[in-house]
């Protein structure tokens, strides 16, 4: 017997969005001979010509699984509070491949870079649709959970000029308004520097055994493993931005693991909204909240 529960949940979210005066539109933001990537855009049904901030969400799944429907809940929530919200497909380069210790380091890095490029492509598409969607192109936030967090952090801190794989059509010296990452990490903490630092929100379980909270190898692999890859997790990112006198919010879930990667997106999006609103109001801060 088929399990219709996920379908019913998606129908409920869509119906709830309509009842709250929201529209949901699907766009293909990139397509070539082998790949088609789509996004769902949530916006409010109003007649005011007010440009709105945007948040883009990238789901988790180890770059091998997952889908954009995971972002429906947080997108609906952010739209209800004045944002245009998008949840995207991205390249699942590690599908049918090993993303753990027995994998290949170069393949893992490529998966992250491809997904970051897809976020840039999605951003470029939104810029081209800014008038139609009534979005403020200077106020674009990116976000993600787990693999989506890694993609978002690298999209925020890698240079499209140096790492871009496509014709991105992003403005020169483009910067996101902010980035929100659940249990994410960077492969090089020095990607964050004084010129490119942006407001960053990170949250992470301190006992995460997949993506390290501080500095360790991905999945805590042995140094001789074929898939060994150093990761700089949320606490390291917070410390780096602190050194650079930037704006950062860290939520540390004491003795919790990778299950917290999507917690705020899926269960408690209010802190995400609060962070984005504070950034839009021009606030600067370093915050570290400890949750036991």
Image (cartoon, rainbow, N blue to C red):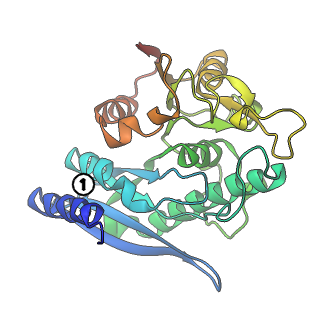
Residue 278 against residue 62 in the figure, above or below: above
Question: What percent of the width, then of the height, locates residue 62?
Answer: 60, 51
Q: Nearer the viewer, residue 218 or 38?
A: 218
Residue wearing tag 1: 50
Q: Is residue 176 left or right of residue 168?
A: left
Q: Quadrant of residue 273?
A: top left
Q: Quadrant of residue 69?
A: bottom left
- Outermost residue on the front side: it is 1
Mark 1 burial class by Cα count in 10 Å: few <14, some 14-19, many 20+: few
Residue 199 appears anywhere in the view: yes
Residue 46 appears anywhere in the view: no
Question: What percent of the width, then of the height, locates residue 269?
Answer: 31, 37
Q: Nearer the viewer, residue 291 or 152?
A: 291
Q: Considering the image in quadrants, where does the N terminus appear?
A: bottom left
Q: Is residue 179 left or right of residue 45?
A: right
Question: What percent of the width, then of the height, locates residue 271?
Answer: 33, 29
Q: Residue at x 63, y 34 (%)?
A: 211
Q: Considering the image in quadrants, where does the C terminus appear?
A: top left
- Outermost residue on the right side: it is 224
């Amino acid at each position: 017997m088929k399990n219709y529960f996920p379908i019913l949940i998606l129908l409920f979210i869509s119906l709830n969005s309509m009842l709250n005066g929201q529209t949901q539109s699907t766009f293909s933001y990139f397509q070539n001979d082998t790949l088609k990537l789509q996004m769902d855009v949530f916006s409010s049904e109003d007649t005011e010509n007010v440009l709105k901030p945007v948040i883009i969400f990238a789901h988790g799944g180890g770059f091998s699984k997952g889908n954009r429907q995971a972002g429906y809940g947080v997108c609906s929530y952010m739209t209800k509070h004045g944002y245009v919200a998008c949840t995207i497909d991205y390249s699942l380069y590690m599908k049918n491949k090993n993303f753990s210790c027995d994998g290949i380091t170069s393949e893992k890095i490529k998966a992250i870079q491809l997904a970051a490029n897809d976020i840039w492509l999605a951003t470029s598409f939104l810029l081209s649709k800014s008038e139609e969607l009534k979005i403020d192109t200077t106020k674009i936030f990116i976000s993600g959970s787990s693999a989506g967090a890694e993609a978002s952090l690298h999209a925020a801190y890698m240079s499209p000029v140096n790492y871009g794989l496509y014709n991105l059509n992003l403005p020169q010296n483009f910067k996101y308004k902010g980035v929100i990452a659940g249990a994410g990490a960077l492969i090089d903490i020095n990607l964050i520097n004084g010129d490119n630092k942006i407001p960053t929100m990170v949250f992470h379980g301190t006992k995460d055994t997949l993506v390290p909270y501080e500095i360790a190898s991905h999945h805590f692999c042995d140094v001789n493993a074929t898939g060994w890859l150093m990761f700089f997790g949320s606490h390291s990112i917070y410390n780096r931005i602190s050194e650079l006198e930037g704006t950062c919010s860290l939520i540390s879930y004491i003795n919790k693991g990778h299950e917290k990667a999507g917690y705020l997106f899926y269960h408690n999006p209010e802190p995400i909204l609060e962070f984005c609103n504070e950034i839009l109001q021009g606030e600067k801060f370093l915050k570290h909240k400890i949750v036991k």
